[in-house]
Image (cartoon, helix red, strand yellow):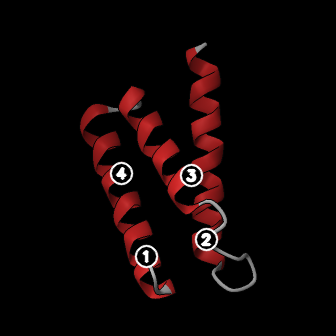
Amino acid sequence: MNSPVGSQAVFWDRLLSLADTIESRGLCAETVNHLLAIEVGFAGSFEPTEEYPEYAAMRLCMALQRHLEKSAD
């Protein structure tokens, strides 16, 4: 992920894959794993002032991942 544009494309592809997983399997352990992979893989990649849509989507993924982990306990 050398270029910001490449990083953004990979990020959106991962979100699309996550949407496919949710549609086909629902909210499950695999969903949490996808969310965690997005959080770990893209942590600090997007600046809110420069890449706001990506930043907001990343925050949503983080919030969903934490919520799903709490719900599983």
| Depicted 29 relative to depicted 22: above or below | above
Residue type, label 4: Ala
Q: Residue furthest left?
A: 24
User: How packed is label 3: few (under 14 Cα within 10 Å), some, or many (20 or more)?
Assistant: some
Residue type, label 3: Glu
Indicate the quadrant where residue 2 lies.
Answer: bottom left
Q: Earlier in the sequence, mark 3 or mark 1?
A: 1
Tag nearer the camera, 3 or 1: 1
Check whether the beta carbons of the residues at disc 1 and disc 2 lie within 8 A of each other. yes
Residue type, label 1: Met
Q: Which mark is residue 39?
A: 3
> Residue at image x 37%, y 59%?
14
Would residue 13 be found to the left or right of residue 47 on screen? left
Q: Earlier in the sequence, mark 4 or mark 2?
A: 4
User: How packed is label 1: few (under 14 Cα within 10 Å), some, or many (20 or more)?
Assistant: few
Q: Earlier in the sequence, mark 2 or mark 3?
A: 3
Tag nearer the camera, 4 or 2: 2
User: How packed is label 2: few (under 14 Cα within 10 Å), some, or many (20 or more)?
Assistant: some
Residue type, label 2: Ser
Residue 5 position in % (x across, y down): 45, 86
Would residue 59 be found to the left or right of residue 49 on screen? left
Q: Earlier in the sequence, mark 4 or mark 3?
A: 4
CA distance for labels 2 and 3:
10 Å
Tag nearer the camera, 4 or 3: 3
Q: Which mark is residue 1?
A: 1
Q: Identify residue for label 4.
A: 19
CA distance for labels 4 and 3:
15 Å
Q: Identify residue for label 2.
A: 45
CA distance for labels 1 and 2:
10 Å
Viewport quadrant of the N terminus: bottom left
> Residue at image x 62%, y 47%?
62
Viewport quadrant of the C terminus: top right
